[in-house]
C-alpha cells in the first residue's frame, strides 16, 4: 500500500482528492450564488411594495394581482376629456364654388367648434365656415344631435367666427387666460381630424412656443399664435387648445405641413372681448378707428418712397364721422401703437382694435414729421 506523505511538497494529490476538491469548489460557488441571489431577492422583495408605491403601483396580497394608481399628471388627459368633450362640436358646411369647367358646385367642408355659452354660441375658425360664404352649416353635438347653425360674426384676418344653434342642455367650456400660458406647459387639443370619422380625437403635447407668426397665403399672416406639438390635422380647425385645468387657452387654426409637431392656435384672449359681448348682449358691436391704411413695406414697394420706419400702418385716408377724424389722426401719419400693442401692419391693427368696445379710451401713437405723437381717443 502506498503511503501519502503530506509533508513532501513534491508528492502530488491523488486524483480522487483533486476531483473532490473541485466538486467542493463548484459547490461552494453555486451555494454562494444561490445564497447571494436569495439574499438580494429577499432584500428587494422586502422593499418592493415601498418601491412600487413610490411609482403609484400596489401589489395584492397574493403578489400576482397588480393595481395601478397613476399619479395626477397621468390622469390629467382623461380628466380634461371628461370635462370638455360635451362642449366640443363637429361642424359640417356646404359652400358653393364656381368651377371653370363644371360651373357652380357644392363643396363640403368639416371642422370643429367649441360651445362658449349655454344659449348656443359656438366659437370656431372663420375659414371653417368659408369666411362667411357657406350656404349650409350644421353642428353635431356630443349627444348625437345635429342642429342648423347661423353665422353671427366672422373676421378673416383673425380667422375667428361665432355661430349659433338653438338647443337645450348645451354645456359651455371654461375659458382660460392665454396671457398666463408658458412654454413647456401641458397642451391638449380636441377636434375632428380628417373628418367626422375620427370625431373628438384628443391629442396631447406641450406649449412649444409663443407669439409665433405664420403666413397664410396671398401675402397675409396671423400673428401672436401659440405653437404646440399636440397633433393638429385638417378637421381640427376651430377646436379648443386646452391647459391642464381643462380651460380653453386657444382655438386651433393651422398646421405646418412641411414639418412634424408644428401646430398653431389663436390665443383665447384675442377672442374674449368678442365672446364677452355675445354672452352679455347677445350681439357684437365692432368699433372702428376710421382710417384707410397700408402696411409700411407695401407703401414703399408701391410708391418707391422710403419711410423713416420699417413697420407700422401708413394712413392715406381718414373717413368722415370717425374716431380718427374727431381726435386728429391725419393722412400721412404712421400708426405705431394702439394702447400698449405694437402695430406692425394692418392685420395687427385690426386685431388690436377688436379688444375695444364703444366708449373705451386708449392712446394712438403715430409718427408725424419724424416725431412720435400720442393721441388720446374714445371709440364710438
Image (cartoon, rainbow, N blue to C red):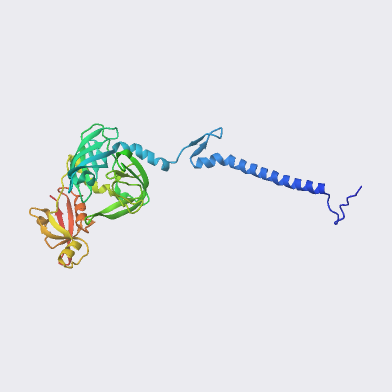
Q: Residue at x 70, y 47 (%)?
A: 29
**Residue 155 visible at all:** yes
Residue 53's place in the image compared with 353, above or below, is above
Name the residue furthest front: 101
Residue 279 appears in the picture as rendered: no
Residue drawn at x 32%, y 46% as measured from the top left: 233
Q: Residue at left 15%, top 56%? A: 376
Q: Where is residue 264 in the image (x, y as percent from the top left)?
A: 30, 50
Give the percent coordinates (x, y) of residue 114. Answer: 27, 40
Front residue of this view, candidates 78 and 133: 133
Dividing the picture into quadrants, the one containing residue 311 is bottom left
Instruction: Name the spot of residue 339 as percent of width and height, x first.
Output: 21, 55
Q: Quadrant of residue 108?
A: top left
Residue 380 percent location from the top left of the image: 12, 49
The reply, left or right, for residue 319 in relation to residue 190 is: left
Q: Is residue 317 left or right of residue 20?
A: left
**Residue at the right extreme, as displayed:** 1
Could you say which is closer to the camera, residue 126 or residue 280?
126
Residue lying at 14% horizontally and 60% vertically, measured from the top left: 315
Q: In this view, does 270 lie to the left or right of 189?
A: left
Amino acid at each position: 500500500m502506498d503511503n501519502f506523505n503530506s509533508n513532501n511538497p513534491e508528492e502530488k494529490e491523488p486524483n480522487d482528492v483533486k476531483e473532490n476538491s473541485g466538486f467542493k469548489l463548484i459547490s461552494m460557488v453555486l451555494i454562494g450564488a444561490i445564497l447571494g441571489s436569495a439574499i438580494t431577492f429577499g432584500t428587494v422583495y422586502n422593499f418592493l411594495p415601498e418601491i412600487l408605491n413610490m411609482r403609484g403601483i400596489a401589489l395584492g396580497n397574493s403578489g400576482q394581482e397588480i393595481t395601478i394608481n397613476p399619479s395626477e399628471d397621468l390622469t390629467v388627459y382623461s380628466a380634461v376629456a371628461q370635462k370638455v368633450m360635451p362642449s366640443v362640436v363637429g361642424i359640417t358646411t356646404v359652400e358653393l364654388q364656381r368651377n371653370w369647367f363644371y360651373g357652380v358646385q357644392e363643396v363640403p367642408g368639416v371642422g370643429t367648434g367649441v360651445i362658449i355659452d349655454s344659449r348656443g354660441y359656438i366659437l370656431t375658425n372663420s375659414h371653417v365656415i368659408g369666411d362667411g360664404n357657406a350656404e349650409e352649416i350644421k353642428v353635431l353635438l356630443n349627444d348625437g344631435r345635429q342642429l342648423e347653425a347661423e353665422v353671427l360674426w366672422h373676421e378673416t384676418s383673425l380667422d375667428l367666427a361665432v355661430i349659433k344653434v338653438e338647443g337645450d342642455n348645451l354645456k359651455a367650456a371654461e375659458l382660460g387666460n392665454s396671457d398666463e400660458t408658458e412654454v413647456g406647459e401641458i397642451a391638449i387639443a380636441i377636434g375632428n381630424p380628417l373628418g367626422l370619422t375620427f370625431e373628438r380625437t384628443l391629442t396631447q403635447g406641450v406649449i412649444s412656443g409663443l407669439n409665433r407668426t405664420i403666413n397664410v397665403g396671398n401675402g397675409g399672416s396671423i400673428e401672436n399664435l401659440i405653437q404646440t406639438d399636440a397633433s393638429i390635422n385638417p378637421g381640427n380647425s376651430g377646436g379648443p387648445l386646452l391647459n391642464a385645468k381643462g380651460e380653453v387657452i386657444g382655438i386651433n387654426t393651422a398646421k405646418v405641413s412641411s414639418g412634424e409637431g408644428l401646430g398653431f392656435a389663436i390665443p383665447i384672449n384675442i377672442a374674449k372681448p368678442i365672446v364677452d359681448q355675445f354672452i352679455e348682449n347677445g350681439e357684437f358691436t365692432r368699433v372702428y378707428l376710421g382710417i384707410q391704411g397700408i402696411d409700411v413695406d407695401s407703401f414703399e414697394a408701391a410708391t418707391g418712397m422710403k419711410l423713416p420706419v420699417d413697420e407700422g400702418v401708413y394712413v392715406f385716408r381718414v373717413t368722415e364721422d370717425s374716431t380718427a377724424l374727431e381726435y386728429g389722426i391725419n393722412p400721412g401719419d404712421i400708426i405705431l401703437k394702439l394702447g400698449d400693442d405694437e402695430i406692425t401692419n394692418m392685420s395687427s391693427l385690426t386685431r388690436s382694435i377688436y379688444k375695444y368696445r364703444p366708449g373705451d379710451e386708449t392712446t394712438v401713437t403715430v409718427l408725424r414729421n419724424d416725431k412720435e405723437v400720442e393721441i388720446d381717443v374714445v371709440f364710438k
